[in-house]
Amino acid sequence: AQKLHLLRHNVLSFVSSRTGSDLTRRQYDVIVVGGGHAGTEAAAAAARLGAETLLITQKIMTIGALSCNPSLGGVGKGQLVREVDALDGLCGRAGDSAGVHFSILNRSKGPAVWGPRAQLDRERYRQFIQSELLSTPRLTVLEGSVDELLVSQPNPEEPGHHRVTGIRLVDGSHPILSSSVVLTTGTFLSGSLFMGQTTSPGGRMGDAQSCAGLSYTLKETLGLRVGRLRTGTPPRIVKESVDLSLAQLQAPDKQPTPFSFLNTHTRCKPEEQLPCYLTHTTPGVERVVRESVHLNCHIQQDTKGPRYCPSIESRVLRFPGRRHQVWLEPEGLTSDLLYPQGLSMTMPPDLQLRLLREIPALHRAEIRAPGYGVQYDFVCPTQLTPSLQVKSTQGLFLAGQINGTTGYEEAAAQGLWAGVNAGRTALSLPPIALSRTQSYIGVLIDDLVGRGVTEPYRMFTSRAEFRTYLRPDNADLRLTPRGFEEVGCVTLRRYKKAVSVRDGLQEALMALQSVALSSTRWREKLGNISLSENKSTTLNRKQCWTFRIDIYAVYRPHCEKQSREMERIRSEESLSLPSDMDYLSLPVSLSHEVREILDRVRPNTLGAATRLPGMTPAGIIHLLNYVLRTG
Ligand code: FAD
């Protein structure tokens, strides 16, 4: 409690020394707008690069807030967290500090698609992110609301092309200048909150929507195409009112696996972890949903809702008669609340209570805060470059939910990369991209800028063609050296650690490759570690190395095949593609979307085809094989 008090005191004195009027500078290398998951990573990354950075957010106390579920990671998302950590971002270490229930999801599949995940203590997560930001050199945090983006038109002969020059706060104080601005306003852009038949402006319950001036600049001044998306959150339930004996206990892994490559253990000790519980909906839940549709304006507007994290109303209406899973998750070590994952809802509060009580474990449930929905503007991300810069506006970067994604991990990953590029622009360095063959972050950005979104985008391992290489266990080896040597966002400490791991593994592999043994004998020699055993064992140092070598050995042949294929693509870039090729009915495995683009653009060479939006490496290999076979 004393520590928390001290932190609060530091944050507040920090704010008061940096209110709009007494900011020491009026010009920054980089300005980041929004202190959510994208904004915090963007600001920290730009500052790590060496840019003098200003983070402006509506409320400093909500920096690092988990707006919805108190959890981090999962299948695909855990890979993103590992990659953000490998590039020295914050969320992995914050997860290790705040986690109260760690588990590796998807363990029945190969380790390439395992999903590191943790339930979080909301307070600990917020505290970690805030204390990291407040102690980051070259980073200033300002509480305020940005009302306007300042832009100039660099060349009158290029109408529609702009350059960002700074921002103006809603309090009317002087403009703050910068040639690099990262917008990470989440669900706040023209945000509307929904509960029952009530709609009110807001970005999140208790927080105002983004100022109208910002939306105006994006839509009217810059002419950006903007769409509308929606999401929602469940009611928070008083733990004591739940009969957990009627739900199924879900234990965490006995040994928590840290997200961060810098950590060997998590703050929460294995025995301190909290359980989750699983229960299910009943026919009574469906009845309440059906009876309340006419009182639920969010669901009336669109009964289908988003495909990922849909509301209970949409799930019941789309799949009548089905039993749906409900996870009862802890909100923190000392919190007296439970988070019912799977019960996001927007009906009136009295009906929310009626619905909950139709579930046996919740028959006496009390609600602390009702669920609600939010609808917001997003900027169609095909208007961005792979560095997340707006194509038509030099120096303006967008990251997070504003680009049509959903989830903390997707936001953090984009934030880090936008921050890197905003920092590079400010330091007069060229933009830099991550490829989809190198990282899930590359897959995420390539999907967004190449294909755009029609519904909130979330990461899955199936989106990555090279998932046997893009594993959670090797994100440090894939990204940390590049992050230090080329990008500049990784500290020397982390770099040295990654290099020593890389060298150690290489040495061990060379030694092992010089000895020929059967795989059974190898297992015996290496201490009989099985890939799925970690759940019940504490990994010592020798076992950790054995574990990584084991995974490497399993995937090596496949990864080598993929890298040979990539080499083939590079060497065949100038191969001509027949101008009369019938892409629409080509007998190869290509998505309908890619066929249409190929048919419309008709690229002259394979190299030109690789650069088409939405074209994947796997698609190019199919195309290459087909042309060589038939040509
Ligand atoms: P946010 O975390 O929303 O942060 C935006 C920040 O920008 C805020 O701090 C805000 O104060 C600040 N800001 C906005 N405008 C301005 C301005 N003009 N000036 C200064 N600061 C500004 N994700 C899921 O994965 N599953 C879910 O089920 C889910 N449900 C959700 C339900 C609700 C009701 C909400 C609000 C979000 C939900 N999310 C869900 C989304 C999740 O919270 C986001 O994906 C994630 O927080 C996005 O991070 P971000 O950094 O883009 O934006």
Image (cartoon, rainbow, N blue to C red):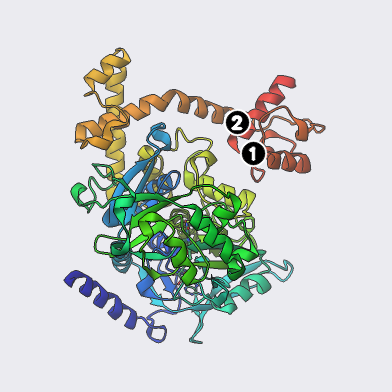
How far from the left and from the top, in percent, is residue 305? 59, 57
Residue 120, quarter of the rendered image: bottom left
**Mark toward the start of the polypeptide (2 vs 1):** 2
**Cβ of mark 2 under 8 A from ligand 1:** no
Q: Is residue 597 left or right of residue 106?
A: right
Please identify the quarter of the rendering in which residue 472 is found: top left
Residue in front for this viewpoint, 109 or 484:
109
**Contact, CB < 8 Å: mark 2 with mark 1?**
yes
Q: Position of residue 381 (x, y in %)?
A: 61, 57
Identify whether 511 is placed above or below 585. Answer: above
The count of marks equals: 2
What residue did someone put label 1 on? 610
Amino acid type at mark 1: Thr
Q: Quadrant of the C terminus?
A: top right
The reply to whether residue 181 is in sight is no
Report the residue that reaches farthest toward the right.
580
Amino acid type assigned to the residue bearing label 2 in the image: Ile
Q: Please name the residue shown 27% across and 35% down the image.
A: 534
Q: Is mark 1 within 8 Å of ligand 1?
A: no
Q: Is residue 268 above or below residue 131?
A: above
What whole-number distance in Å separates the C-alpha atoms at marks 2 and 1? Answer: 9 Å
Q: Residue 440: x percent and y percent?
A: 48, 44
Q: Which mark is residue 418?
A: none
Q: Residue at x 62, y 68 (%)?
A: 294
- Residue underneath mark 2: 569
Q: Nearer the viewer, residue 222 or 296?
A: 296
Residue 29, image x and y in percent?
A: 45, 68
SS at badge 1: helix
